[in-house]
Structures are given as C-alpha cells and as structure tokens.
Amino acid sequence: MCGIVGFTGVNPASPILLDGLEKLEYRGYDSAGIAVISDGKIGTAKTVERIRNLIDKTDGGKAVPGSIGIGHTRWATHGGPSETNAHPHLSGNRKFAVVHNGIIENYVELKEKLIKEGHIFASETDTEVVPQLLEKYYDGDLLGAVAKVTSMLEGSFALGIVCTDYPETLVAAKKFSPLIIGCGKGENYIASDVTALISHTRDVIYLEDDTIAVISKDDVNLYDYNKNPVKYDVSHIDWDIAAAEKGGYDYFMMKEMCEEPRAIRQTVDSRIKNGSVVLEDISLTAEDLKKINRISIVACGSAYHAGIVGKYVMEELLRLPVDVDLASEYRYRNPITDSKTLTIIISQSGETADTLAALKEAKARGSRVLSIVNVVGSSIAKASDDVIYTWAGPEIAVATTKGYTTQLSVLYLFAIWAAEQLGTQSKETLAEITESLHNLPNAIDRVLDSKEKIKKMAKHCVDSQSLFFIGRNIDYAVALEASLKLKEISYIHSEAYAAGELKHGTISLIEEGRTVIALVAQEDLFDKMLSNVKEVRARGAYVVACANEGDTAIEAEAEEVIYIPKVHKLLRAAVEIIPFQLYAYYVAEYKGLDIDKPRNLAKSVTVE
Ligand code: F6R
C-alpha cells in the first residue's frame, strides 16, 4: 500500500520526509517522491529505485530546500511504476502538490472534463485529477478549494496537499484510507502510518473520514466539507517501532487479514457501475469471448486454490468447461490449448517462475492470456494480453490472505462480466450476485469481529498431529486453502478432502479424537454433508463445523460451530475462508511460531 508523510515546521523538511519514507519502506513500494516549498516555488525529487537513491540524489535532502513538504511511496495501481507516475503530483500552474493513497473511482470522468477545459496531464494516475481540480476551484481560499474538490471525489483517499500561496500550511483530507496527524513542538506532521512519525512524536490525531485538516507548525484545525470546525482528541502512542510497522498488530498476517474488507472494496467497487460489472482494464470483448470454447486456469499454491473456486463459479455462470492446473504440472504435460482457449493466470506476486513458464507455454500454443495479478508491472503482468489487478496492496506475510480473497473477488467480477457478455444468465441473477459481491466486505468484517471465539476454538487442535478438512463443491475448494493455511504456518499436517470421497479410503484414518473440520455452507448439499459429518463422528471424530448463519441443524452433529454471514452461494468462499485464516494464525500463535515467516517458505517463488 502507498505511504504518505508530510511536515511543516522551521527545520529543513526534506531530511524529515526522506526519513519518514524510509520508515514506510516495509510496506512495499515501487517508486517514491517528495515536494517541498521554498521561495514560493515547489521543488520535487522522485525515484523508481530505493529511498536510499532519493537520499543520494538529493544530497540527503539539501537539493530540495524548504521547511514544508510532502512525500510518498507509491505502490502502482493506475499506471505502471515510473517517475512520471510517482507522487507528488503538481497542478498545471505548479501552485499545488498532492500525495494520495487510495483509489479515486470517478477519475476517468473528472479527467476527461478537465482535459476538455484545457488542463494538461503528465501522468496516467488517478491522483493527478486532484491538483488539477484544486487549480480549477482555487480562488484564494485553500480550505474552500480542498472542501469543494474532496466532496467531488468518489472512492477512497488520504491526501496530503501543499500550496505555494500558503507556504506554512499543510492540508490533509481523508475518506476510507488512514491518515494521522503528528503533533510536535513548533512542528507538525502527517503520515499514513505511525511508523513514519514515531521517532518525532507520539502524540497523534487520527483523522476521521470526510474531514479536512489545516495544519501549521503551531496549530491543527479540523473542518467538515462545509468548513465547520470539527473537534478532535490527541492520542498518545506507546508502541515500539517494530509494532508500529505492523500497525500495532503482532504480525503482518493479522494486519493483512484485517485489511481484507478494504482490499476487496478497492478491488471491486470501482469495477461496479450502476449495478453492473465494468472491466475497463481489459481489451477482451464480447466477440472475443464468444469465440472461446474453454477456459484454462493455471496457478500455484493458494492462487491455484482460488482458481478451483473460479472453476465452480465460472462453469455455473458461463456454462463453459473450465480446467484448473498447477503451473508446475501444466508446463511439463504437453497441454492441449489453442486460440479457442482463454488461459487465466493467477498470481499475487506476478513473479512465480512456474506460473510465468506456464503462461509462456499457453501463449506459444496460441491461447489468449488474461492474468489476475497484484503487482503492477510484474513479469506475469507484462507477459499477458490482459491483466485485471487485485488492488490488495503489498502482502508481506508469507501466507497469503488478502491476496487470495482479492483473487477470488476478481474471479467473481470476471465471471459476472463474462456471463453478461455471453448472455448465459438473466439480468436479475447477475444483479443479485453483483450486489452480494459489493456487500462481501461487510460480511468479512463480521467474521473478523468473531476473532476471539475462533481463537478459543483454535486451542483445541494445538497438540494435534493431523486433521481433516472436508467439504463439497465450493466448500471443498475452501477446504483446500484452509488446509494449506494451517499446514504452512502451524506445521500441523492436515488434508482437505471432498467429503464424498472420504469413504474411498481416507476414512480409515478417522479415529477417536481426530479433528475434522466440516465446511457446510452450500445449502443444496447440506444434507449430504450432514451424512458425511455423521460418518466421521460415528468413528470418534471431534467435529468443528462452519455453516451459514441460521443453519443451526448442524449443532446436533458438531462439537463446535463457526457461523458465517450468508452471501450469494457462488461467493461464499471469500467469507468462509476467513475463519480458517484466523484459525491457522491462532494455532501458530499458541505454538509460538514465527507466523509471518514460516520455515522453508519464501514469499515469491522465483525458482522452479
Ligand atoms: C500460500 C501462498 C502460496 C502462493 C503461491 C503462488 O499462502 O502464499 O501458496 O499462493 O506460492 O504465489 P503467487 O500468487 O505469488 O504466484
């Protein structure tokens, strides 16, 4: 995720901004920049390399003098990583400089209008509309212009703004993206994350949504969009620096799980317009889709598990055959694919060696490749015909969480969009699924609220040697991912089984006290699952079930039940996995393991 830092005071701003940006490096970024006001002019410096490069380039900040400024680390979303796309962005008249975190969903229409009015854009970013709009609406009243512009923006934003007419005033505004103000003595700060300012001050104001902060070196004033003053409290932070990097969480994995609702909102919301899915990112047309007679999904690990969910959803909605392959198998099995196959490659990092090789194999055989990738400009993104990005922000914990659920979200978006293009489902059905997709983050928020209950449940399996996850249909696909999560971070062996397959061998492993986690969230298969649960229970299993709220009949057959809010049945995987990401996390925590860096594993597998 991008990072923001800002400073106003009497000391040189650049060294403070550069220091703040270095502190934000852990969040991941692909470019960075600073803008500082001096003698009524904005000076900038940018890099697509490390912050160290920006420090060297500016002689430790001396080359960009001034005692008020803003800085940014960018994680590319709109437009690839480049100095032109790096923030801060300036207005055409160079009066305003702006840094931004989040996504401005209506930037296309705002930009088109501004271009017609003669504004010239330098970058491909959504952010650049903000300084251009400020230039347009500014009449000498800075607060008024910021209030006008921020009320026009849709989506999410945390903004840091400086204006040459106000050479001591830093302005900040926020909606759905975090922003804090650091209160010093004779100097004040803004940052997207306490890490950037904790070495300067521990007194902070957490900016609320739809609030504008006008900050000078001695004063902080908050306003609503009507310029009415807003009261605030100053909080004192007592975390150490390491905890601050993790936003106060013990591990990145927990931070990233808590970010899942926001990551899905960022991935989904701007792609739903007037109740329909709009995929402006891809050049694939309805005509292209009609020529396709099969979809082939290729990926590794959790991304492969997301692909299995995609198979169930796409076959249901598109009535096209969908195959899912492990990239490491696909690349060596002489795959049957041609121009009538659409290959969907899924990869969080965009750098997984096997997945990249499989992509090349599919292309060489004439298949069109659409990728679902988190890292803009990654090798897989570059090699694909089309990319739909998951806007999850950087994922640092080795075990993927928000990467996986945003991959699911993109698969859902694509399936709904393709069904509309192919006319395979009624408008009503697609509208119903789309609405449920839009509401997914709320359902996930509710599961995250039951953390403490899941933590208590996780205690039971800390000493287990082995356990089973069972499910049918999409629940089976979730079982595969839930089992992987548990194995990789808690080192407890587990197996995911299609519930109907147990009696073909594996049931012999069920014995007194063996934990079996039964995923029972597909109502059409509820009775079948109930029978499978009875089978294992009759052999002594300790059953933990996961069911939809209201499906209480399972209670009679399970020692413990986790309920999840009911969303459209095709979308359930994204909600159902959350308790098991948490479950795996707590088991690993009870065992005192290094949750973010499980043994023998790497975040990005760039070797075969
Ligand atoms: C498991 C996990 C891995 C990755 C796999 C593919 O938690 O993270 O299984 O899903 O290595 O990685 P990407 O998606 O980067 O291609």
Image (tube, rainbow, N blue to C red):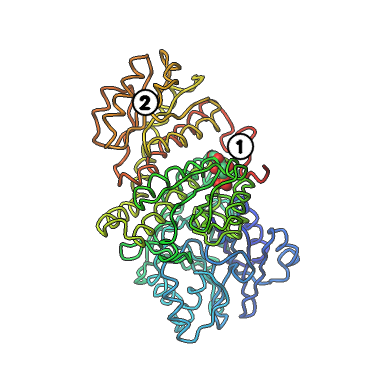
Residue at which label 2 appears: 544
Q: Nearer the viewer, residue 79 or 419?
A: 419
Q: Quadrant of ligand 1?
A: top right
Residue reaching furthest to the bottom:
118
- Compared with residue 422, is residue 67 higher up or lower down, i.e. above or below? below
Residue placed under numbered mark 1 in the picture:
597
Residue shown at 37% from the left, 67% from the top: 224
- Between 115 and 146, which is closer to the camera in this rendering? 115
Q: Tell me the kind of residue under disc 2.
A: Val
CB contact under 8 Å: marks 1 and 2: no
Side of 159 relative to 31 (left or right): left
Q: Quadrant of the N terminus?
A: bottom right
Amino acid tagged 1:
Lys
Closer to viewer: mark 1 or mark 2: 2
Tell me residue 157's x, y (percent): 45, 63
The residue located at (44%, 84%) in the rendering is 139
The one nearer the camera, 138 or 449, is 449
Q: Answer few, some or many: residues within 10 Å of disc 2's Cα (few below 14, many 20 plus, some between 14 and 19).
A: many
Q: Secondary structure at mark 1?
A: loop
From mark 1 to mark 2, how far is it between C-alphas? 27 Å
Q: Circle 2 — which element?
A: strand
- In this view, the residue in front, 516 or 200, is 516
Instruction: Name which residue lies at 49% across and 78% down.
Output: 132
How many numbered marks have been drawn onto this rendered protein structure?
A: 2
The residue at the point 40 percent across, 61 percent down is 290
**Percent of width and height locating residue 544:** 36, 26
Q: Residues within 10 Å of mark 1 (few under 14, many from 20)?
A: some
Residue 75 in the image, given as x and y percentages of width and height: 57, 59
